[in-house]
Image: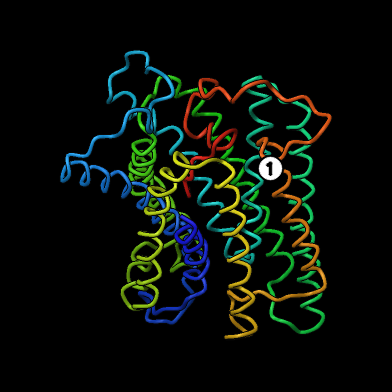
Amino acid sequence: MLLTGTLNTLTTKIQFTMESVGIDGEDKTFTKPWYGTFNMLSAMFLVLVVEQIFMGCTLFKRPSGKDVPLLDGGGKPWSQKVILVAIPAAFDLLATAFCCIGIMYIPASVWQMLRGSALVFCALLSVVFLKRKLYAYNWLGLFFCVVGITSVGLANVLGTKQDDSSGGASEDTGFLVYGMTLVLLGQIVQAAQVIAEEWLMKDVDLPSVQIIGFEGFWGILMMIFIVYPLLWILPGDDNGHKEDPFDTMVMISNSPPLMGCVVTYLFSCGTFNITGIQVTAALSAVHRMMMDASRTMVIWAFGLYVHYGVDPNSKFGETWNNYSYMQLVGFFILVIGQAIYGEVLKVPGFKYPSGEVDPSQFTSPAAAAYLASPLPREA
């Protein structure tokens, strides 16, 4: 899970920095964020395909108590439950698109850290729309998360200005802020997806693997019949379109390294979802939090290695400047905030609910993902 999770972020960033020959015969950068979204949805659908093949070939039966529904389903037919999954799939598509566009303008490590803001937005939306009660320690954890995210973003902007003044390789500050804004907007939409699932999917008792797979299925259909036609009609810099899918296919076919990067992400993301479900069920939220923290540090270390050990002009490389310490501190504050919110780290003097968290309070796996034991969907 740690390996594939790290590969997901690295390959997402790397593919948008690679170059290939397009349909117009010109060599250009692969700036195709909507294809990145399509690839992620395909990986989610792949989870369902692999599970069905595995179950069919081995006559595998799930152990009792593993991956069980959170509710009894209210007697709804299976087809109706599958159709309901299309609603959060639309949120998922939009959130992933925002994140794919945002990662083109910011370092991969910062992108990974900012994704931790989903917890903050999900908690706040659950209070507003679901009337969920938060304890004092929850608010303290959210406060630490906000401080950590603010520190990471501010350090990134200030560090970019320092690199500009010293002649280092960096992105324009305006684009940097634009990228971080899109990532944060993506986390807001992702949080809205969780709320939508709680509100609209109370009767959906599908196993988590099927929910992931069918969200990918509906997302693919939306991309083919809605999103790509709109991208073709809207004017843009991609051969006159907002994004040209035919040019995308040509660029991938003309560059074996780019094709390898895309295929690696496809299988890595699918494997991450499958192994993540098993790890979360077998271990705990503590292990998941530790792995996510390790994943962020590995991504950051890799970016530093690329800049100082491979190519200082690489778009994927990251520089170490006077504000990197601020970013590092902000990251640890963010992790501490997540630990406090999730009761992994208990603060003396605060009142905590008695007993274990009751899973029945969650009405969807996605709600449990952000508010209790995380379900590791890379979406």
Residue 156 location in percent, x, y? 74, 64
Residue plotted at (37% across, 18% down) = 73
Residue plotted at (17% across, 44% down) = 58
Residue 114 location in percent, x, y? 66, 53
Residue 350 location in percent, x, y? 80, 28
Which quarter of the figure has residue 344?
top right
Quick one: SS at disc 1? helix
Residue plotted at (77% across, 68% down) = 324
Question: Is 377 left or right of 67, judged from the image as shown?
Answer: right
Question: Is 28 left or right of 294, judged from the image as shown?
Answer: left
Which quarter of the figure has residue 61?
top left
Question: Is 299 left or right of 253, judged from the image as shown?
Answer: right
Up/down of 367 relative to 292, above or below: above
Which residue is under mark 1?
339
Residue 49 location in percent, x, y? 26, 46
Question: Is 316 left or right of 200, judged from the image as shown?
Answer: right
